[in-house]
Each structure stands twice: as structure tokens, then as C-alpha cells.
Image: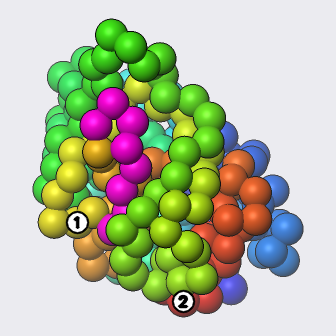
Amino acid sequence: MKVAIIKYNAGNVQSVRYALQRLGIDPILTDNAEELMSADKVIFPGVGEAKSAMDYLKERNLDTLIKDLKQPTLGVCLGLQLMCNHSEERDTDCLGIFDTKVKKFESKTLKVPHMGWNNIHDLKTPLYKGIEDHDYVYYVHSYYAELCENTIAITDYVNPYSASLHKDNFYAAQFHPEKSGDIGQKIIQNFLTNI
């Protein structure tokens, strides 16, 4: 299986690569259109800031390319946020794959960013086959995607929000499956084998 990780100016690529290698997959890291279009699966990771990431994608025509992908594609963290319509982070128009907005957590009592382990529930699609409602995954983020018709998992922090999204061949997780232990590894395995 050929798995491609989209190369752009956002971090956490190595941890995604290691998670795939633990499953016997040696992914390619690329921003080459032909390599991305010919991959069996594509992962769109990210840790960073929405505006500069979108600027980078646009400069290299990756914004159009990502939307045109036909194979299963998994966004992670910032990758999920960039697949939504718009982010409040520096008032950024995003890819518009998922019809929802990304907002900043507002809380006087809970710490922002949301960092650490939290559970997911209301799980849908084969991405979550074998995962139990209220299993725990690992988060690091200050912005969240609102609940919408594309929501396939929910987390509650400050308010309920989309832990995971799905539309057509596009899937995304706000949490970091590559840092979420056995549960995260199972979710990545599901993406590789069940999607």
C-alpha cells in the first residue's frame, strides 16, 4: 500500500510517519502532485497556525490538489481545521471540504489550549470500528470545529465539538491518533484497512 503524507509547513510529520511504520507502512512525505494523486491513502497532518498554513498550500497549488483527491484522505489536528470552511484563527478562509467553522475555545474556567487526554463518543463510520464510546485520545489545540452534519465523533471541552469529521473520501480527527496509544493506532489501522 502506498501512503503519502502531505508535505507542507506544519509540524508533527515524524510522529505520523512512526505510527505508520509501526503498522508496517513506510510512507512517502511529498508535496508532488503526481505522487499524491497516485497514492492509495493520503494523510494531511498538521500542528501550526491556520493562515500561514493556508498561504503555503495556496502558493504551491496544494489547496486545489487536496480538494481534488479521490482516494481516502485523513486530516489530523490542523489538517482537520484546514478542511473546514473558515477558521477564526487570523480570519482564515480554508478548503471548504467540511461545511463547518473553526472557532477559538472561550473559557474563564478551563485551560486553553485543550491539552491532554479526553474521550470521544457518538462514533460513526468504519474509522471507529472496534473503538468504544468514551475511549480516550490525545489532544493539543486552541481551536475546534463546530458540530455539523459531517461530525462522526464528539468530544466535550468547554462545549461539545467535532472530534472527527467525514464527507465522501475525506476523514479528519482533531485529536492526534499517532499520539493516542493503542486506541490511536487502531484508528490509523482502520483508516488503512477499512476505509
Is 34 located above or below residue 115 in the figure?
Answer: below
Most distant residue in the top direction: 108
Q: Residue at x 61, y 42 (%)?
A: 117
Q: Is residue 45 visible?
A: no
Q: CA distance from mark 1 to mark 2?
A: 18 Å
Magenta stretch: includes residue 134 = no
- Tell me: 85 left or right of 50: left
Inspect the image, locate mark 2, and give the three-letter code of the amino acid beneath it. Answer: Asn
Query: Which of the two labelled residues, at mark 1 and mark 2, occupies the earlier sequence position?
Result: 1
Q: Residue at x 49, y 68 (%)?
A: 133
- Tell me: 3 left or right of 59: right
- Tell me: 159 left or right of 121: left
Say if mark 1 contacts mark 2, CB within 8 Å.
no
Nearest the viewer among 36 and 158 is: 158
Mark 2 surroundings within 10 Å by alpha-carbon count, few (fewer than 14), some (14 through 19), many (20 or more): few
Is 182 located above or below residue 160 in the figure?
Answer: below
| Mark identifier at residue 194 | 2
Residue indicated by mark 1 = 150
